[in-house]
């Protein structure tokens, strides 16, 4: 074996190191020198990318764990809401409730909005009405809808305000001054026949601002 002196080692200079995309599992490759001058040699480091393939399983596992965590959080929140207001409310139900409250009571104060939300929730709890928020809000008999914003389309065009979302949240958290109301109307805009039916067939509980509440 030929012995290499310190002087010879000192003469070898690595000019540059370049990171390039992996094309094989080779870790380091020495590019051939174009000339005999050792200082012209370049070290090319080939970085292996196999770890991307190897870790796809881990990425999928993390995503599954994240999705499971989100589902558990939704289930726990639904259970908390049911304990508070007595109604099972899904994420989509909450959106529907916010939209109908905005459409029916967007100009009302906080309590007025809470009361409208209470009426929907009271109906869900009542055996005389459907058992979900969605079914209650969209209930109809032919062309007769339980909530006029569904019939005239206002429900679909409203922008739900932060105040309405807060009112719905409070209703879901158990804030219920409704005295069990199952109906409400705004007499100034009610059809006379409908208003007459309210007065004849229902028990008036109280009025709050523009709405009258019945059961």
Image (cartoon, helix red, strand yellow):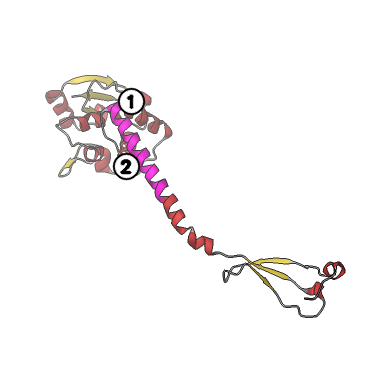
Badge number at residue 40? none
Closest to the observer: 108 or 37?
37
Q: Which secondary structure, mark 2?
A: helix
Report the magenta stretch's main SS.
helix
Picture quarter containing residue 8? bottom right
**Neighbours of disc 2 within 10 Å: few (<14), some (14-19), many (20+):** few
Name the residue carrying label 2. Answer: 92
Name the residue carrying label 1. Answer: 112
> What is the magenta range?
64-85
Q: Which secondary structure, mark 1?
A: helix
Q: Nearer the viewer, mark 2 or mark 1?
A: 2
- Quadrant where the image shows the N terminus: bottom right
- Quadrant where the image shows the C terminus: top left
Whether the magenta-drawn stretch holds residue 207 is answered as no
Residue 163 as seen in the image, left or right of residue 85: right
Q: Residue furthest front?
A: 1
């Amino acid at each position: 074996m030929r012995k290499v002196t310190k002087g010879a080692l000192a003469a070898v200079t690595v000019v540059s190191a370049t990171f390039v995309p992996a094309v094989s599992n080779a870790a380091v490759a020495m590019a051939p020198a174009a000339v005999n001058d050792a200082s012209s040699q370049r070290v090319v480091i080939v970085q292996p990318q196999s770890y991307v393939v190897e870790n796809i399983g881990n990425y999928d596992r993390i995503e599954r764990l994240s999705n499971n965590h989100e589902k558990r959080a939704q289930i726990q929140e639904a259970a908390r809401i049911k304990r508070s207001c007595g109604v099972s409310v899904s994420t989509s139900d909450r959106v529907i409730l916010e939209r109908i409250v905005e459409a029916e009571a967007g100009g009302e104060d906080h309590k007025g909005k809470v009361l409208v939300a209470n009426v929907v929730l009271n109906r869900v709890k009542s055996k005389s009405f459907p058992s979900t928020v969605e079914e209650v809000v969209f209930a109809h008999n032919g062309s007769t809808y339980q909530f006029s914003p569904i019939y005239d389309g206002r429900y679909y065009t409203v922008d739900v305000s932060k105040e309405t979302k807060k009112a719905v949240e409070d209703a879901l958290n158990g804030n219920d001054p409704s005295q069990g109301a199952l109906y409400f109307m705004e007499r100034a805009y009610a059809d006379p026949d409908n208003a007459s039916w309210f007065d004849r067939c229902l028990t008036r509980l109280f009025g709050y601002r523009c709405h009258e509440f019945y059961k």
